[in-house]
Amino acid sequence: MTILVTGGAGFIGSNFVLDWLADPTAEPVVNLDNLTYAGNRANLASLQGDARHSFVHGDICDRALADSLLATHRPRAIVHFAAESHVDRSIHGPGAFMKTNVDGTFTLLEAARAHWGTLAGDAKAAFRFHHVSTDEVYGSLQPGAPAFTEAHPYEPNSPYSASKAASDHLVRAWHHTYGLPVVTTNCSNNYGPYHFPEKLIPLMIVNALAGKPLPVYGDGQQIRDWLYVGDHCSGIRAVLAGGRLGETYNIGGWNEQANIDIVKIVCGLLDELRPDPAGPYARLITYVTDRPGHDRRYAIDARKIERELGWRPAETFATGIRKTVQWYLAHADWVAQVQSGAYRDWVSTNYAARA
Ligand code: NAD
Ligand code: TYD
């Protein structure tokens, strides 16, 4: 048996594939990724020569390709990570988000439905379409409001979260209308190795090490619920193995933190692990113009996945962020490789106009 992973060259997808194949008894992985700016085969370099991993360079919007992969490999599950994932990019150019996140998910659902229709018996019963989504579909919480449960209304506020909400609705409808065996997970903000340095935590690490300003949007008091990526991967494995069909499961770290506190923690770890003779890294913190429509607070109530499947995060924020900073310090080559011309263009697009 095989699993088909989409977006497995990105941040979370590559962590998932590496974790999955770390188990010598794990099923092989077919990894479909079209290598956008966020996809990086270097994330998967340790799998070179491992016959259990097949990389396919292609687009999830390509129905003929999806049909042919499903017919050839007959996977028992599709784990769907592929997406445009950065809120700031969705503000500058929402089109790619609609294409990949909405149309791409629709294409995969249709391919999965056709494939599932050809299965019988145990193979049909075992098949799963696991949709990987985000807590951002629930919108923004007031201070002190209860954390998002799975019953929270969908109130997406950015083009990114609206496109993910649309994809979640498609997945739900394909279950209710066609009976497709789906599960959906809605996870909070991840951090860890191979995180592309356009997102808050890796951006702060790479900018600090380069002596560049650390751009904090608005007042820096926006709250996110941070989860180590390895814990997200174990949560997905738990839901894939035991989640109830048609259900959604929130995955979170029980770790609400204001952005400015995250930046200060990262600076403190760098002061300890790679002190800068010029002074503490926090001197580089610079408040800049806020993100339009910026959600103030996300927080996940992860009791359902714990109650039904016994999942809880293994890392605390203190252990996970230390591992993460150490990983970036040990992988200067990876950091240099991802800071291509296109990356520098993005930094200039996103930050040049922020006062
Ligand atoms: P990422 O941007 O790092 O990686 C996305 C991957 O998808 C890349 O490898 C890219 O090449 C690939 N891809 C994009 N468009 C494609 C297409 N049309 N066809 C094939 N491949 C395509 O994203 P990530 O942070 O790893 O997020 C993975 C998933 O998890 C996304 O669905 C995202 O919405 C969700 N998620 C992310 C977070 C987070 O904190 N990063 C939190 C919760 C949920
Ligand atoms: P990000 O990593 O882009 O994730 P998301 O928007 O999906 O939560 O941003 C996390 C938080 O950090 C968010 O509140 C925006 C903020 N932020 C900054 O303050 N400065 C930055 O340069 C970036 C990229 C994000």
Image (cartoon, rainbow, N blue to C red):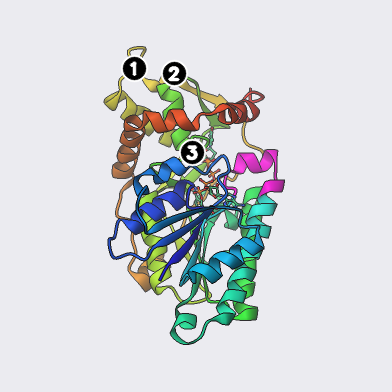
Residue that mark 3 sits on: 196
Quadrant of the rendering where the C terminus is positioned:
top right
- Does the segment drawn in magenta span residue 258? no
Q: CA distance from mark 1 to mark 2?
A: 9 Å
What's under tag 1, amino acid-wise? Asp
> In terms of sequence position, does the residue under pointer 3 or pointer 2 come before the other?
3
Answer with the quarter of the image where residue 307 lies: bottom left
Chain part drawn in magenta: 84-96
Q: CA distance from mark 3 to mark 2?
A: 19 Å
Marks 1 and 2 close (CB-CB < 8 Å) = yes
- The residue at the point 62 percent across, 75 percent down is 114
Residue 293 seen from this side: no
Task: Decide if ligand 1 comes within 8 Å of the CB at mark 3.
Answer: yes
Residue 303 placement (x, y as % from top left): 40, 65
What's under tag 2, amino acid-wise? Gly
- The residue at the point 72 percent across, 47 percent down is 95
Residue that mark 1 sits on: 276
Q: CA distance from mark 1 to mark 3?
A: 23 Å
> How dense is the environment of label 1, judged by Cα within 10 Å: few (below 14), some, or many (20 and up)?
some
> In terms of sequence position, does the residue under pointer 1 or pointer 3 come before the other?
3
Residue that mark 2 sits on: 211
User: Is residue 2 placed above or below 281 in the rendered structure?
Assistant: below
Secondary structure mostly seen in the magenta stretch = helix
